[in-house]
Amino acid sequence: MLSALGAKTVETLAAFGRFSLFTWQMGRWLLPGMVRPRTWALLMPELYEVGNRTLPVIAVTGVFVGLVLAVQSYDQLEAAGFERGMGTLLTLTLVRELGPVLAGVMLAGRVGGALTAELGTMRVTEQISALQVMGADPVRHLVVPRFLACLLFAPLLTFWCNVCGSLAGWFVAVRLKHIPSSPYWYNISANVETFDLVLGFVKSLVFGGAIGLIACYKGFHCRTGAEGVGRACTEAFVTSFIVILATDFFIGTFFSGLYRALYGFKALAIS
């Protein structure tokens, strides 16, 4: 039992070392690559794949999350006499928590799995080895554009999710529950602060970067055969999901303390 535990520990440390080395190899190409026209030429197809083709999935997610939040919160708010504040509750929940997390999960499932499968297939069919033989750095040509696409589009997809959720909540509040439309939007503009938007932006940025990095790493280091590619896709999604939840907690805790330090008279409720 001890030998198995020791072997598992060594394997975990070795995997962490490989991931750290992979991150360093990508990072040293990141800033120089952003000023190279070749990098942007490779980035355009990835931006289309990550952004445009993910918008419908994010829209459906945001709409139904907004509908569910509005329906579930109305009765409790009405009992307390705060039903006109539904817009504030729904939008703050989306902007701070559910928007970044759900957009990240959808990005990990829709894009992360595709990136892992694509790079894993390249590894299995030795296309990555062929790039190395030709003297090209596969990390620079394959990883950097995909990572940048996830990093840049995650905040935009999160914003789109928040907009769709808020509009769906407005539909339930105004059209179904007959709450006046003006108080709904006024309470949102009065209570949603810049700090809340910054919190959601930082979370989405971190989630997008983590998803892109994990997906590319799993694809680069997948085992041979179709089984290896499939297992790498599963591992990429599960790892990304766990990282999203863990970093959501730590970022939320940090920003909660920062908010109290800056505005000590007003508590920031971040779950």
Image (cartoon, rainbow, N blue to C red):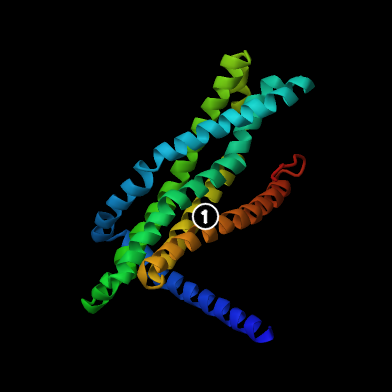
**Quarter of the N terminus within the rendering:** bottom right
Quarter assignment of residue 250: bottom right
Could you tell me residue 87's position as x and y percent? 62, 26
Kindly tell me whether residue 190 is visible in this rendering: no
Give the SS element for disc 1.
Answer: helix
Quarter assignment of residue 8: bottom right
The residue lying at 44 percent from left, 66 percent from top is: 218
Query: The residue under label 1 is which amino acid type?
Result: Val
The residue lying at 40 percent from left, 61 percent from top is: 116
The residue lying at 26 percent from left, 70 percent from top is: 127
Quarter assignment of residue 27: bottom left
The one of 267 and 130 positioned closer to us in this rendering: 130
In the picture shown, does residue 257 fall above or below 161? below
The answer to whether 119 appears left or right of 83 in the picture is left
Could you tell me residue 184's position as x and y percent? 61, 21
The residue lying at 41 percent from left, 47 percent from top is: 153
The answer to whether 251 appears left or right of 235 in the picture is right
The one of 83 and 253 positioned closer to us in this rendering: 83
Could you tell me residue 90's position as x and y percent? 62, 31
- Which residue matches tag 1? 206
The one of 8 and 148 positioned closer to us in this rendering: 8
Q: Residues within 10 Å of mark 1 (few under 14, many from 20)?
A: many
